[in-house]
Amino acid sequence: MTEKDKIYMRRCFELARKGLGLTRANPLVGCVIVHNDRIIGEGYHHEFGGPHAEVNAIRSVKDPSLFPEATLYASLEPCAHYGKTPPCSMLVHQKGIRRVVISNLDPSPRVNGLGIRHMEKAGISVVTGCLEEEGCDLNRRFFVYQKEKRPYVILKWAQTVDGFIDLEREPEDHVGTNWITDEVSRTLVHKWRSEEAAIMVGTNTIITDNPRLNIRRWTGDHPVRVTIDRNGRLSDNAYILDGSQDTIVFTGVPGKYSGRTRSIRVDPSYDLRDLLEELYDQQIISVFVEGGAKLHESFITSGLWDEARVFTGKMSFTQGVRAPELKEIPDETLIFHDTILNLYKNRDNLLHGG
């Protein structure tokens, strides 16, 4: 492995990130084809069901006669199975490419080293582990989904400088949302929503704030809305039940839902692990949890979270609903005008090495 290999692999990562939020349960993959230190083709996996990164990169090459002397770089092991597209490892062999550099092995049962074995059997020189840690971070959602058999969980909340996420309110207090952060931070949250498969809030948050849980401040696909309404407390007027986007309601009370809203029946013993297993079965690769305090505390206590993104605004509430508490030290701290953003990773859940 050379320093030039790393440069081209980083380009693969850049391309792969363009598919964030669009590939559903599939991984983020970028591919670059290099001949004599010149990129002659590149591509990435644009969307679920579409051509894979390797296919797009190979199609972009104008002079196919260069393939035998070219190196193909891929952020993830080329697939070895027939799905919505033919095996990419077979395509690489058919085009006469003789050297392949990969960041991570694909942990899915249908691949898991099989693509590499196919290529090596065909006489292709395969280099693995190029910027492996960076590649693992790129596809952290996919790796958790495949290895832990649950969605990747991201917690997000905003708190005041004195540690509250809201004022104490009753359901009949139609005050609306008590905004803690600024406009820039709220727009960033909508961008984050567009990058995840699902967005989840608790029943109390819906009753008090009636959020739409869409990405009206950004572009892309709306995430699947998810909530737990064990006792059927939600009003028919709740935006989450308006049928405008895919929505899942976990409930113990049968109800009639319209449009793109559906329910999943749960019993009193149903817990977060059961819920995440059900979302895994629904092929939801990631969940963006936005509230409220009880729901966040449940995820933190159970250890079933992977990242947390916590805004701290400049205002004080003096009293109200206490913000969740994380014992971890922030991995990164950013400042947006009057708002501080602390980013955390759950070290107990980190999966190293792809």
Image (cartoon, helix red, strand yellow):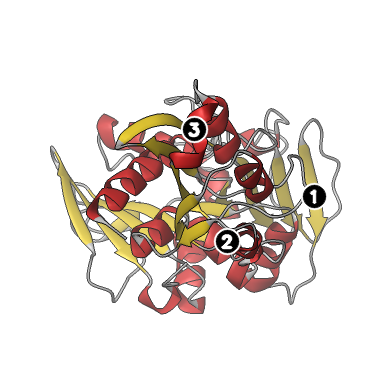
Please name the amino acid that badge 1 sits on.
Answer: Ser
Mark 3: secondary structure? strand
Location of residue 317 in the rendering, given as x and y in whole percent from the top left corner: 24, 52
Q: Is residue 322 visible?
A: no
Query: Is 312 in front, or is 128?
Result: 128
Query: Is 302 in front, or is 97?
Result: 97
Identify the residue at horizontal 66%, vertical 64% (top origin). Answer: 114
Location of residue 300 in the rendering, given as x and y in whole percent from the top left corner: 44, 72
Q: Is residue 218 left or right of residue 23?
A: left
- Tag 2 residue: 106
Mark 1: secondary structure? strand
Name which of mark 1 and mark 3 comes first in the sequence. Answer: 3
Query: Is 139 in front, or is 230?
Result: 139
Picture disc at residue 43: 3
Distance, label 1 to label 2, CA atoms, is: 33 Å
Please name the amino acid that badge 2 sits on.
Answer: Asp
Picture disc at residue 263: 1
